[in-house]
Image (cartoon, helix red, strand yellow):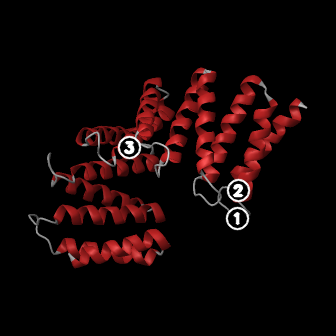
Amino acid sequence: MSLNNLAECLRESFGLLRELSDLEEAITLHQQALDLQNVDHPQRSMSLNNLAACLGDRFKSKGLPVDLEESIALHQQALELRPAGHPDRYMSISNLAECHRDRFSLHGTLSDLDRAIELNQQALKVYSRSHAYLFVSLGNLAACFGDRFKLQGSSADLESAIDLHQQALELCPGGHLHHSMTLNNLAECLRDRFHLHGTLADIDLAIKLLHDASKLCHPGHPYRPMTFNNLAGCLRDRFNAQGASGHLEEAICLHQQVLNLHPMGHPYQSMTLNNLAICLGDRFRVQ
């Protein structure tokens, strides 16, 4: 277990400091631990899972498809060693689903997204209603349905995403660590439905949810720029629907605040400048 333990410490260090050398060493140690285990070793599924997770981290850091492919293969092997009733089966199902969604994002292959949906649905069947991470699986499945809606435009997928995000929100009430992100996720889907059907109640609820989320995102909060940007987008939609200048003014103010959080050199600065410019153009046209 010492190789696994040291490797996991290095992975945690990578998560905090983002030093790629820590992750590379963790991968080496997990591979060494796996090489020492025969196919019947009681800890083999854990070693497969841990190595796959590290390779997934490296894929997200460096973008090498080979890392993602190996991560998928290892997670699949771990899942096969965790049959129905195994206490960690839900983890392997969820991890494999995440990798298939990542591969969909990389290549756009619908079969990967369909597989991710199938796996996330399986994971939900494994969870009890009181499981601490049920909200994560609900959110993951909702995100996959949202991806498929954006790809194929099926309103049934969007409705499924909204229903699942609502269930996740019920499990993440005020004070929950992930409450603000869950509010953002549901608001995004409601905004999509507004774009689809034009129902003002959807955009009004999205704005309310994002106002609630923004109150939780104090200065320095990692979700503050995203939340402000999402809220500004919804307010502009509301302005375009009915022409209330107050919505546009608030959108401009929010984009200006986001711009302060995205200074020169920030990867999202150009997008933020563009969003602010569009709103200023709207204000010019109505004056």
From the viewer's perspective, tell me whether residue 166 is left or right of residue 121: right
Q: Quadrant of residue 145?
A: top left
Q: Which label is found at residue 25? A: none
Give me the residue at 50% from left, 44% from top. 174
Q: Amino acid at mark 3?
A: Phe
Q: Amino acid at mark 1?
A: Gly
Give me the residue at 59% from left, 57% from top. 221
From the viewer's perspective, tell me whether residue 213 is left or right of residue 154: right
Please identify the quadrant where the N terminus is shown. bottom left
- Judged by depth in the image, the label closer to the viewer, 3 or 2, is 3
Q: Extreme left residue here?
A: 40
Q: Are marks 1 and 2 in contact (CB under 8 Å)?
A: yes
SS under mark 2 = helix
Q: Which residue is mark 2?
A: 269
Across and down, in percent, residue 38 comes to 11, 69
Q: Nearer the viewer, residue 219 or 115?
A: 219
* CA distance separating discs 1 and 2: 7 Å
SS under mark 1 = loop
Q: Which residue is mark 1?
A: 265
Give me the residue at 70% from left, 52% from top. 258
- Specify whether residue 27 is in view: no
